[in-house]
Image: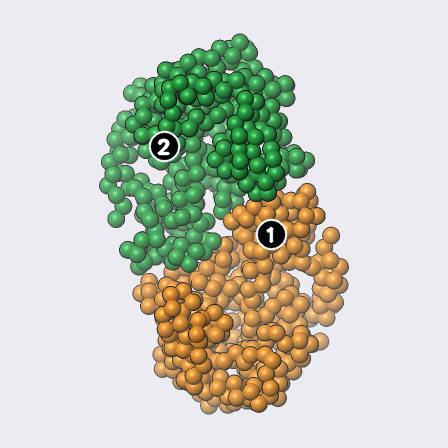
Chain colours: A orange, B green
Amino acid sequence: MPFSFELQAKSSETDARAGLIQTARGQVQTPAFMPVGTAATVKGMTTDEVQDLGSNLIVCNTYHLMLRPGEGLVQDLGGLHPFMHWSGLILTDSGGYQAFSLAQTRKLEPGGVRFRSHIDGTEYFLTPQRSMEIQCALNSDIVMVLDECTPYPVTAAEARQSMELSLNWEQVSLQHFHELNQNSNKGLFCIVQGSVYSDLRLECYQKLREWDEAKDGQGFAGFAMGGLAIGEPQELTREVVATVTPQLPADKPRYLMGMGYPEDLVEGVAAGSDMFDCVLPTRNGRNGQLFTSRGELNIRNARYARDERPIDPDCPCTTCRNYSRAYLRHLFQAKEILAARLGTYHNLAYYLRLMESLREAIIQDRFNAFKKDFYEQRSQGID
Amino acid sequence: MPFSFELQAKSSETDARAGLIQTARGQVQTPAFMPVGTAATVKGMTTDEVQDLGSNLIVCNTYHLMLRPGEGLVQDLGGLHPFMHWSGLILTDSGGYQAFSLAQTRKLEPGGVRFRSHIDGTEYFLTPQRSMEIQCALNSDIVMVLDECTPYPVTAAEARQSMELSLNWEQVSLQHFHELNQNSNKGLFCIVQGSVYSDLRLECYQKLREWDEAKDGQGFAGFAMGGLAIGEPQELTREVVATVTPQLPADKPRYLMGMGYPEDLVEGVAAGSDMFDCVLPTRNGRNGQLFTSRGELNIRNARYARDERPIDPDCPCTTCRNYSRAYLRHLFQAKEILAARLGTYHNLAYYLRLMESLREAIIQDRFNAFKKDFYEQRSQGID
């Protein structure tokens, strides 16, 4: 079964949609939040736990995996899925973003990114072709084109230049992906760039859509919005998302990359985005910032030292069923491994439950009521 | 139901025994290995996992808990069991050993140990009375007397002096424990000291036994061997254990403190020990040294980089059922939290399974055959 997307419901009040991604490997209900499993592990969690929490699609990072253990090793061992014991779907990013943010002495060239590994200094040259080869060696289900994440702030002229570089790379990615994958179950997603300039983004999108249609079913399986939430004011992010997302093809999944806070997910869904990823629930879970329907709670705070309540009395997750705030605070103070485990587990449980509720609200066509309730609760604060 | 111990089977070939500890909180089959949950957590594991692996008795460290979060807080929250979500039994040590090995500027005084916290420098004075108070505030099921762990090497004269100090503290501990606990379900264990001098140890034991019998049921619930495996040659340890252990009361559990490697457990059981604790399986599990029936395996070794086999093909644990050596090595190389989790889980599974097999061999009176087989397998090495 090739990669497919079925639109299942549409909100009559907003652009929010519910859908279903299907591949030979399984199904993913959208809107979906994808837990981040950087180095082939969602930090601190077993894959069984991630699946039990309701996720069937995670993100892995090409940059990390190409450096260690190397895509060749993963390929020889059957690909990422058996390697990390994950039977769900995997989306890999292109590697470009982290080559810029993490690597030593990186250099943008017209053909790709030259950089040195932050682990051992080895030089790499990441081109669109290489990114496709690596992601296919990893055997991910959803492959991302190589693009340049336009930095912020940026002038319109610089943003155009960056967007055009991305388009070049995306064209090469598209060509090479299909050369590598005849009759494949994988899907290739393109990425709309253009920074905070909606007109630039729409121009970028038009070009991508042209290529997509010319390929007659051998084009892009989905459309992503990249280069957002990287420092620009939140209103600008929201405006760009709300302006551009509804213009993307209705019959393909839309992926809002790298976002975000629960509010970002709700607004993204309202604008018609279907897929999300972010390190927030996992990273903050490890650091003791715990998400709840009534706002965030920093468990290291002294006020929780003797608090016998769970993180969130309304949360059905194992962390909340078994452990008190007082105990969790103790674990975080003592820098215990279990602290990171239980915090991550709770945060992912919250994020995944939020996505389920959003989907339900869309299917029952009561999105605005859900959103109002969501904001009311979130603004209450947790006592 | 007060603390009780029932002897269930005795090897006809060795001093090995199988027994049952019972308290109002539950049962523990012996011989038993007790996972170490230093700061009210077996590092990296949930209590549900520890129990699923077959353990119903863990050790927590008084020194760590008195410093953080403090026994008063734990007491106010109902004691260690609800605090850490553990429904099995808990043994706490006296705090003395770690006051000497971890604290800053510690000083031995006739009445106790004066030391400064390694966390924040606060001064504490740990006396036998305080140790009893703290352990009872934590509400552990098995309380250890305060003793001095005689350093090694040591002359016979120094060892006697240290042993006599321990006896003084143990007498005060016994007195104070029963003042604090009228009709309690807890059991107080004394500790036989005397370093590598078996005659000293037997003298120490005679004194403890006298006090125990004089108290007519209000004495010691069990007898421990302390101050071993702290640097002395292994043959000396084994000799002392084999000489002294069989002399300890047959109708009370015997606890061989701080040991050890799988071979130490087998020899300890052969000498008639019933209880064991050691950080080896958990600490080494976090560091990538994994125990198997055919010896240890250092998973960081480059030879495992592409090894698709589980740690131990014969091991039924979740780590071995789901994850390859190649993946585990990758997790350890990448310093992932999951590495520590999976390594700890596997090592505890091995230790607890070993204890079950030992118990079975005793009950079926085939201890020597088991032991022969155990050594043959362990010496093979794992390929």
Q: Which chain carries label 1?
A: A
Residue B159: tell me if it is visible: yes
Label 2, residues with CA under 10 Å away: few <14, some 14-19, many ≥20: few
The residue lying at 47 percent from left, 12 percent from top is B207
The residue lying at 44 percent from left, 79 percent from top is A107
Locate the N terminus of chain A by quadrant: bottom left
Q: Which of A22 and A137 is in front in this view?
A: A137
Q: Which of marks 1 and 2 is in front?
A: 2
- What is the x, y in percent for residue B267? 33, 28
The answer to whether residue B67 is above or below residue A291 is above
Label 1, residues with CA under 10 Å away: few <14, some 14-19, many ≥20: some
Q: Residue A84 carries which label?
A: none
Q: What residue type is labelled 2?
A: Gly
Q: Nearer the viewer, residue A2 or B245?
A: B245
Where does label 2 land, which residue?
Answer: B231
Q: Are the residues at dot 1 and dot 2 in contact (C-beta closer than 8 Å)?
A: no
- What is the x, y in percent for residue B343? 41, 48
Residue B55: tell me if it is visible: no
- What is the x, y in percent for residue A257? 55, 73
Q: Which mark is residue A317?
A: 1
Q: Is residue A179 left or right of residue A224?
A: left
The residue lying at 51 percent from left, 13 percent from top is B212
The answer to whether residue A359 is above or below residue A128 is above
Q: What residue type is labelled 1?
A: Cys
- What is the x, y in percent for residue B374? 28, 34
What secondary structure is marked by label 2? loop
Q: Is residue A118 left or right of residue A349?
A: left
What secondary structure is marked by label 1? loop
